[in-house]
Image (tube, rainbow, N blue to C red):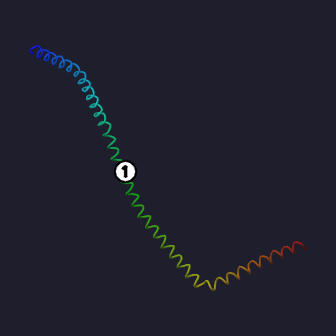
Amino acid sequence: MEALAAAALVVLAVVSVVWTALLIPVLLEFKRASWRLQEFIRTLELDLRPVLQEAREGIREMTKAAQGVADSTARLRGAMAAMEEAGENLRVTTGAIRAVFGSRLIPVASVLAGVRAGVKTLWKRYRQRRERS
C-alpha cells in the first residue's frame, strides 16, 4: 500500500509540475493582455476626453441655435400677424372705397375711357386722310 501511496504522490507531484509549467505561459499571456488593455484604456481616455468636450460644445451650440430659431419663430409669427392685420385693413379700406365711389366712379371712368378711345381713333383717321390728300 505504501508503494501505491508513493506512486500517487509522485503522480500528484508530476501533475502539479506540469500544471504549473502550463499555467506560467497562460499567466504571462494574461499579463500581456492586461498591459494591452491598460494601454488601450489610457489611449481611449486621452482621445475620448477631447471628443467629449467637443460634443459638449456642439450640444451647447445646438442649444443656442435652437433658442435662436425659437426667438426668430416668435418674431416671424408677430410679423405674419401684423401683415395679416394690414391685409385685412387694406381689404376693409378697398371695400369702403368701392362702396362710396364705386357706383358713381366706375360708370364715369368707363365713359371717359370710351371717349378717349374714340378720340384716338378719330385722330388716326383724320391724320390718314390728310396724308392721302
- Residue under pointer 1: 61
Picture coordinates of residue 132 (x, y %)?
A: 89, 72
Picture coordinates of residue 25 (x, y %)?
A: 25, 21
100 or 77, nearer to the observer: 77
| Residue at image point 28% right, 31% down | 37
55 or 114, nearer to the observer: 55
36 or 63, nearer to the observer: 36
119 lies left or right of 37: right
Q: Secondary structure at mark 1?
A: helix
Question: Which residue of the protein is positioned furthest toward the front in this rendering?
Answer: 1
Picture coordinates of residue 117 (x, y %)?
A: 75, 77
Disc 1 packing (10 Å; few <14; some 14–19; many ≥20): few
Q: Is residue 38 above or below residue 5?
A: below
Q: Is residue 5 above or below residue 97?
A: above
Asked which quadrant contains residue 2, the reply is: top left
| Residue at image point 32% right, 44% down | 53
| Residue at image point 38% right, 56% down | 66
Picture coordinates of residue 96 (x, y %)?
A: 55, 82
97 lies left or right of 4: right
Q: Which quadrant is home to the C terminus? A: bottom right
